[in-house]
Image: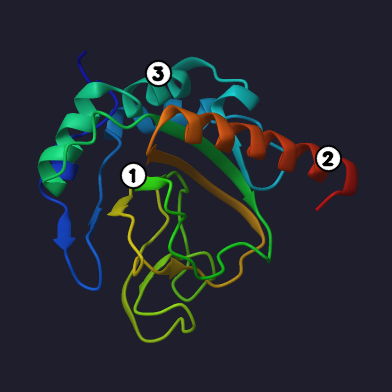
């Protein structure tokens, strides 16, 4: 399929490093002439946290964006960039609009994830503000850090999951729009993650947490 919303050159030319783990950081991943439509069609999510695409009403150009993010064409570009064949791994796509103070604690992602990609969709973000993801050296400290990811429109950040793939961000409360694609080890893990996410959202709806 032709990718009309994604600029794959942003993947090909992204800054890439293997220290402290294998990641890439690029900008301009969303084509400029699509931004207004994507901003308009971003889901009207009221709940905090990540929701799977099954839990969100997708419409218009944003629905097309999810199709492109989940496409074999994009997986091929990422496979080439990272030197690892990602095609065998099923994808879990989640969307977040609202952040809470407890989000962003330092972690590596679980071993069921092979790679994670984040696409940010915020119009601006002040320097020094919380919510800016950091590539970290350990599981305890936000400083020093290797790089800080500006969560602005069209920023793309992806990394291969490992025991040292530490990342997190300082607390932030409010609107923080991001789409996450995770390549997971197998279909059973995909189903388990979807079920767990639905349960978490259910209890958030009851307890407001």
Circles 3 and 1: CB distance less than 8 Å? Answer: no
Is 153 on the left-hand or right-hand side of 197? left
Which residue is under mark 2?
A: 205
Location of residue 8 in the rendering, given as x and y in whole percent from the top left corner: 17, 35
Location of residue 12 in the rendering, given as x and y in whole percent from the top left corner: 11, 44
* Disc 2: CA contacts within 10 A as few (<14), some (14-19) or many (>=20): few
Rendered-image quadrant of the N terminus = top left
Distance Cα–Cα, label 3 vs label 1: 16 Å
Q: Quadrant of residue 24?
A: bottom left
Q: Is residue 117 visible?
A: no
Mark 3 against mark 2, which lies toward the viewer? 2
Q: Residue at x 19, y 39 (%)?
A: 78
Which residue is under mark 1?
A: 154
Q: Is residue 100 visible?
A: yes
Q: Is residue 198 above or below residue 16?
A: above
Q: Is residue 52 above or below residue 2?
A: below
* Disc 3: CA contacts within 10 A as few (<14), some (14-19) or many (>=20): some
């Amino acid at each position: 399929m032709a990718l009309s919303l994604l600029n794959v050159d942003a993947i090909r030319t992204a800054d890439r490093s293997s220290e402290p783990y294998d990641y890439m950081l690029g900008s301009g991943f969303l084509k400029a002439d699509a931004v207004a439509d994507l901003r308009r069609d971003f889901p009207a999510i009221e709940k905090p946290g990540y929701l799977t695409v099954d839990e969100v009403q997708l419409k218009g150009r944003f629905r097309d964006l999810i199709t492109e993010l989940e496409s074999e064409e994009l997986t091929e570009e990422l496979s080439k960039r990272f030197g690892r064949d990602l095609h065998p791994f099923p994808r879990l796509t989640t969307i977040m609009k609202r952040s809470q103070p407890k989000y962003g604690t330092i972690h590596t992602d679980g071993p069921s994830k092979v790679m994670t990609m984040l696409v940010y969709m915020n119009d601006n973000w002040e320097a020094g503000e919380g919510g800016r993801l950091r590539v970290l050296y350990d599981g305890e400290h936000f400083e020093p850090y290797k790089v800080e990811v500006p969560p602005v429109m069209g920023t793309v950040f992806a990394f291969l999951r490992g025991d040292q793939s530490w990342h997190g961000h300082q607390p932030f409360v409010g609107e923080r729009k991001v789409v996450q694609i995770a390549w997971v080890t197998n279909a059973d893990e995909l189903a388990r993650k979807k079920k767990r996410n639905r349960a978490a959202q259910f209890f958030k709806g009851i307890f407001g947490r």
